[in-house]
Image (tube, rainbow, N blue to C red):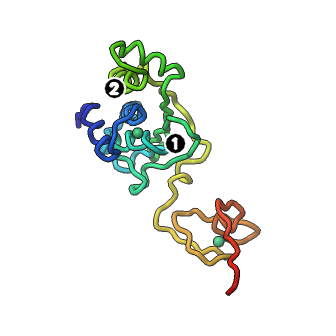
Amino acid sequence: MNVSIDQLLAVSQARHSHLCPRQVLGVRIGLAGFAALEQEPHTAGKNVLVILETDGCFADGVESATGCTVGHRTLRVEDYGKIAAVFVEVPSGKAVRVSPQINVRSKAVSYAVEAHNSYQAMLQAYRTMPEADLLDVRPVSLTTPIETLISQAGLRAVCERCGEEIINEREVALGGQVLCRACGGLPYYAYVPQSRR
Ligand SMILES: [Zn+2]
Ligand SMILES: [Zn+2]
């Protein structure tokens, strides 16, 4: 498939209701990650897992470029608050991290001298800058095995404390018990006590 950056940006813009520099970076980073793994965007199926380091506009760009989605279990967010993504080949675990070069904002100005302001400069320059000037693409190894990250879909367990069902091997073993992550001590929420009426 040979789709231009402008076509991919049109897709991203349509789902996002505006076009912004972060979506452009998302498209460029998505394409660069797939190229580094020698995979074809939108047709790689579950052969690639993308881990985004932020959500928002950037995520729409990456999704538009790659076809990877949360719904297909080919995309997830590790929220580090960074415009960057790791692309993992499945099942080999070979991976690359793609991020904008540190000084990319100031570089953008020199690629779009006719732009009215730095926002417009980024919007224009991020489309056209050569990848070698725009992005860093570096091999990485995952600290969690790829099988654990993806897990086996369809498996079920039941938390021995709250009784809720846990899918996709996300249970934890603690003190001889099978627990969900919330009961196992890693909750991101706490129930608010309800007053009795
Ligand atoms: Zn945006
Ligand atoms: Zn539980």
The answer to whether 9 is drawn above or below residue 194 in the figure is: above
Measure the C-alpha gap from mark 2 to mark 1.
20 Å
Q: Residues within 10 Å of mark 2 (few under 14, many from 20)?
A: some
Which residue type does callout 1 highlight? Thr
User: Are the two marked residues, 2 and 1, in contact with CB atoms closer than 8 angstroms?
Assistant: no
Question: Residue 32: image x %, image y %?
Answer: 39, 30
Question: Residue 116: image x %, image y %?
Answer: 36, 19
Q: State the residue position of label 2.
A: 127
Q: Quadrant of the N terminus?
A: top left
User: Considering the numbered disc 1 on the image, is that residue within a helix, a strand or a loop?
Assistant: loop
Question: Residue 9: image x %, image y %?
Answer: 30, 36
Which residue type does callout 2 highlight? Arg
Q: Quadrant of the C terminus?
A: bottom right
Q: Which is nearer the eye, 140 or 99?
A: 99
The answer to whether 80 is drawn above or below residue 139 in the figure is: below
Say whether mark 1 is within 8 Å of ligand 1: no
User: Considering the numbered disc 2 on the image, is that residue within a helix, a strand or a loop?
Assistant: helix
Q: Quadrant of residue 41?
A: top left
Q: Quadrant of residue 16?
A: top left
Q: State the residue position of label 1.
A: 54
Residue in view at x 43 percent, y 53 percent: 70
Say which label, 2 or 1, has the lower sequence index.
1
